[in-house]
Image: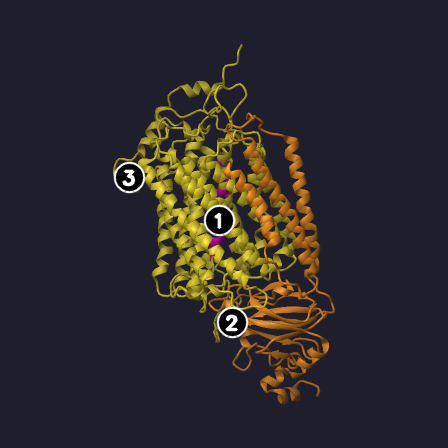
Amino acid sequence: MVDAVIGSEPIPPAEVGEVELYHPHSWITRYVFSQDAKVIAIQYSLTAMAIGLVALVLSWLMRWQLAFPGTLSFVDPSQYLQYITMHGMIMVVYLLTALFLGGFGNYLIPLMLGARDMAFPYLNMLSYWIYLLAVLVLVSSFFVPGGPTGAGWTLYPPQAILQGTPGYEMGIILMLASLIIFIIGFTMGGLNYVVTVLQGRARGMTLMRMPLTVWGIFTATVLALLAFPALFVGAVMMLFDRVLGTSFFMPSLVSMGEQLQYGGGSPILFQHLFWFFGHPEVYIVALPAFGIVSDLISTHARRNIFGYRMMVWAIVAIGVLSFVVWAHHMYVSGMNPWFGFFFATTTLIIAIPTAIKVYNWVLTLWRGDIHLTIPMLFALAFIVTFVNGGLTGLFLGNVVVDVPLSDTMFVVAHFHMVMGVAPIFVIFGALYHWYPKVTGRMLNEGLGQLHFWVTFLGAYAIFFPMHYLGLLGVPRRYHEMGSTSFVPESAQSLNVFITVAALIVGAVQLVFLFNLIWSLRYGRESGGNPWRATTLEWQTPETPPPHGNWGKELPVVYRWAYDYNVPGAKEDFLPQNRPPEPSPA
Amino acid sequence: MPIVLALILIAVGSVLFHALSPWWWTPIASNWGYIDSTLIITFWITGMVFVAVVLFMAYCVYRFRHGGPERPHYEPENKRLEWALTIATAIGVAAMLAPGLFVWHQFVTVPDEATDVEIVARQWSWSFRLPGKDGRLGTSDVRNISAENPLGLNPRDPLGQDDVVVETGDLHLQIDKPVKILLRSTDVLHNFYVPEFRGKMDMVPGSVTYFWLTPTRTGTFDILCAELCGVGHPQMRGAVVVADEAAYQTWLGEQRTFAELSGMTTIMKANFMPAEK
């Protein structure tokens, strides 16, 4: 009740003055060196999508090579390794991480929390430009002698910095430098998101009233701030090994018949550092997706998210557990095999909070009023692919089952399904969902339907059968299988099928890009709240929201984010800033 | 309702693909049938969960579609249901984890009667070493590697003199005899992978890794490298021949020892070793 009184007052003058300090005064400060989180979000998203297109083209080349080996004259074994490496690293770090945290994080955190901007807008701007520099350094490796590194996205030493691996001359140096730069930029953005969530919430926005989108992005950012330093030191140490001749990861060895000067280092140490980052990284991508999809499902099913508190605790539990499962990527790495007991147990325990999330999404559909909008369709597709990929994770997490499957195409199929396809479906759903807020126009529905159906069925057709190539025993990172006694001829027809599906799915993404551009001008005008959603970003006075988001008065929050179809309410949704009805006295 | 049909198609289609497609693992040739059994248990549990979740979703989407017969229902939480599902999940997870850890315990417990076999990898070929009559492998170090001594055996170690070195050629194993596979690399990471054996393990320069198995079926099986090791990775092939005792002994008799290969027999015998045939 006290809140309501404060909320009706104009915001104190001091607050307006502070906003004025960084208000854009020219085209450059408005659109290029902008400190507005929303502009930075768009810059992050466009950069991430642009570099993602490079990774998409690389995946076409790889799939073409696997289905029709030798038909593209410029694809040799070195090129193939460079494609898989760059595809993997771009998709995981420079696309997914950047888009979820830099893109959605920047756009949604201030708006959903009722803040005017991020806590440190200047740092936020620097974060983007440093990210762009990291992307440019990465791309430059395509143009140096020897080309980009072909060490695999895991960059395992000693191979990554030795002859016999493409790009060992310059490519690996640029890759490590780019990662170091990326982490510096990310740290600036990440600290910003955490501080903003903890300090920048509107009056009444308690932590347990935050939309799950913010919970997901917030927890993922905390994970990233704790996990990226491990990759950072790993990258610096490997750079030293490569450039200065130290031996952090290098034992004595003979490379191509020549005794090298290295000695005493441990290759497995790098793997521990890499996966101490690498496993939380999976959840850095997954937790924002979990959060966003929860809000998509609740909004478009017109029903409160089921078990909100359990959902929050599941996100936090997954975040904590994700730091004690990393060595399940290393069951056959040669580490002490007794570690397997611990890591298999922790890994399978993490399945429990994850399963709770799945149940609660499905139970949100149960007794809802399901609108089959494009965001909802993508949310449903997410559940299917995430459940599929999560369940195959139970194979790979259960140490002894992992042994025959590790390093085969089963692993490739698993992680593409669970952290490629599933989060990208959430990204698509989210873009269809929030595009009207960003631009004031709806994306075209017909093109959206085409995009959804081809992408959903196509992606499943690519990755579901791929598991069976792994069961057959086809190892990953082979540019061609060659002859064996155990892989039947028919496996090649499966490869051709997967490639055809991949090319079609890739092509339909161009339809999506066209839709993004076309609708900017010709899309139907959306108004401020086309989905009749409860969260604060839909309640801004103007759409698209201007710098500072809220005009004169900050919103005041009275309820959680999921008041859909509340008994007795006139409308089927109650925005978070709608004051409670005066009780009939 | 195309999405309802699509969901049903995916649930049913995935099961049919699993049951009817010709792509399945190659028949086993080692004692690790338990691994296959654990995998089958996992397939059953996860398969049922997948089909149940997807079909239930299809049902929800159909029954609670906008404009359908049902009215939406406001229900923030249902403690009983949430806990029941959590416990059921925990039981399912335990049903997979328990046999998994049981089998893993066997996998990491090498039986005493297992004999050593060393596999040495380098870019991009395989070599093998078997202990000689003393039953023990001599020490090695990559610093000893030279054109004459490609595996880097210690020329001063008497235990290594009678080691059987298979530089080019196949590895032979005797059926039903457990072996401890010792894995060594002289340059980068590799992985010793024989699909029929189910086991696999990385080979790490600077250390010796291992696993064990008992071959249970005669035949010739492909050895592949399963850890990315540079441009020659897919071409890094070898073969392992599982044979009965007589054939194995015949093969073994044709192999040469380290001492014979390095031409140092006489010197070593004079200095260190008791005379033997």
Q: Can you identify the residue that label 1 sits on?
A: A459
Subunit under mark 3: A
Q: Can you identify the residue that label 3 sits on?
A: A29
Query: Would you place residue A340 above or below residue B273 in this image?
Result: above
In this structure image, what is the colour of chain A? yellow
Left/right of residue A319 with respect to residue B199 in the rendered view: left
Q: Amino acid at mark 3?
A: Thr
Tally of marks: 3
- Judging by colour alone, the chain drawn in orange in this rendered image is B
Residue B98 pos. (x, y %): 70, 50
Nearer the viewer's eye, disc 3 or disc 1?
A: 1
Left/right of residue B269 with respect to residue A108 in the rendered view: right
Q: CA distance from mark 2 to mark 1?
A: 35 Å
Nearer the viewer's eye, disc 3 or disc 2?
A: 2
Quadrant assignment, res A366? top right
Residue B193 pos. (x, y %): 59, 65
Quadrant assignment, res A106? top left
Q: Secondary structure at mark 2?
A: loop
Q: Can you identify the residue that label 2 sits on?
A: B124
A231 drawn magenta: yes
Q: Nearer the viewer, residue A473 or A155?
A: A473
* Pointer 2 and pointer 1 on the same chain: no
Q: Residue at x 71, y 55 (%)?
A: B102
The stretch in magenta equals A213-234
Query: Would you place residue A40 above or below residue A267 in this image?
Result: above
Report if residue A213 is visible in the image: yes
Q: Residue at x 42, y 56 (%)?
A: A60
Earlier along the polypeptide chain: callout 3 or callout 1?
Answer: 3
Q: Amino acid at mark 2?
A: Trp
Nearer the viewer's eye, disc 2 or disc 1?
A: 1
Query: Would you place residue A40 above or below residue B190 in this image?
Result: above
